[in-house]
Amino acid sequence: MKILHVCLTGGYTEGFAYQENYLSKYHALDGHDVTILTTEYCWNHNKWRKCKEIDYWNKNNVHIIRLPYKVKLPYKINSYVGKFQGLDKLLNNIKPNLIFIHNLQFRDIKLINSYKKAHKNTRILADSHTDFSNSARNWLSKYILYKFYWKKYATIANHCVEKFYGVLPARVDFLRNIYKLPANKCELLVMGADDEEVKNASKKERLEETRRKFGYTTDDFVIVTGGKIDIWKKQTLLLMQAIKKINNDKLKLLIFGPVSDNIKNEFNSLVDTKQIIHINWANSTQSYEYFAIANLVVFPGRHSVYWEQAAGQGKPLICKYWEGTTHIDLGGNVIFLMEDSVEEMVYQIKKVINDKEKFKLMEKIAFEKGMQTFSYKKISAKSIK
């Protein structure tokens, strides 16, 4: 098929561990002719900036086309206006068999609806990454921006989209309850892990090399956590304090990801380079390598795409409990933290280390079910069935 991925709500950035990156990759690997239509902007140095390349094929043989906004306005304003130059012309040139829309917050979704009316055999699917943890967090945003403004365009999309995928249970709820889309058209399509990266990171020689890099021995119990550490994930500090409180020389903590300035001093005071190591940044491949050496992966703060990646690498998890994110639990591979406290983390980590039978069961479920459920090869195939 000719598959067109439409990423016009924000932008598309190469190397990110997002749904649009992996679905397009595995659609191309499965033999489809794949194009990504996106904005001129990508994430660079902690800001949305104009990309240098606007029409190219990436390493996965996916054709990337970047469209300029229709009106010259600041990026922040244009991201709400959501109108682009030449979208209708490109749709007619590409003539896709299937259009996959990533997020619904752009006004030119009307043009896709018009294209569907003229090309009735074209299938259209959409996913959504919006919930109350990242959007509609105050009255103005919830009732004016989402329930009024963006709901209008979700309703337009409903005329042409056959299936809406929320990438978390909470995001399925958002589609149904805020946008009021039909419940029978809204389903969960989980995020996951890149099968190729999982395979490469778990090779024996790669595992040994990565462990050696950090000075870990074979009998060290290594906990890994990753992602941006900011005010929304400040619980990482509690995890660090818990590791020190347990006072076990064989217990190690590896943290990767940038730290916000407002908590950097407190964070740095807890890093000792022996028991707690911090890596400022990890690219996509490195994140797979770091999770691969973990005995246990802990996410004490808000959800990120790393939850599904670590689960897809077959790792047992300890995660902060958030309503609408319990899909990560496949029957015993996860322990949920019910409160933000050092004592709770000490208790749960000690339980994992000391109860060897329970931990073996967690590992078994994580390996057997996690790597199947959160495989992007399988998710990408499911997404277009």
Image (cartoon, rainbow, N blue to C red):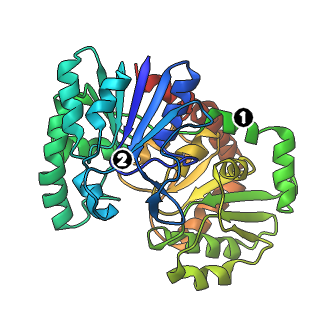
Tell me the SS state at disc 1.
Answer: helix
- Rounded to the nearest angstrom, the CA distance separating label 2 from label 1 is 27 Å
Name the image quarter holding residue 35: top left
Could you classify mark 1 by the number of other residues whose Cα lies within 10 Å: few (under 14), some (14-19), or many (20 or more)? few
Q: Which residue carries the number 1 mark?
A: 199
Seen at 16% across and 46% down, the residue is: 151
Whether residue 125 is visible to the viewer of this picture, yes or no, is no
Q: Say if 183 sits above or below 261 in the image.
A: above
The circle on residue 129 is: 2
Q: Say if 38 sits above or below 221 in the image.
A: above
Whether residue 242 is visible to the viewer of this picture, yes or no, is yes
Q: Nearer the viewer, residue 196 or 83?
A: 83
Q: Say if 238 sits above or below 19 in the image.
A: below
Residue 191: x and y in percent read: 48, 40
The amino acid beneath tag 2 is His
User: What quarter of the picture does the C terminus occupy?
Assistant: top left
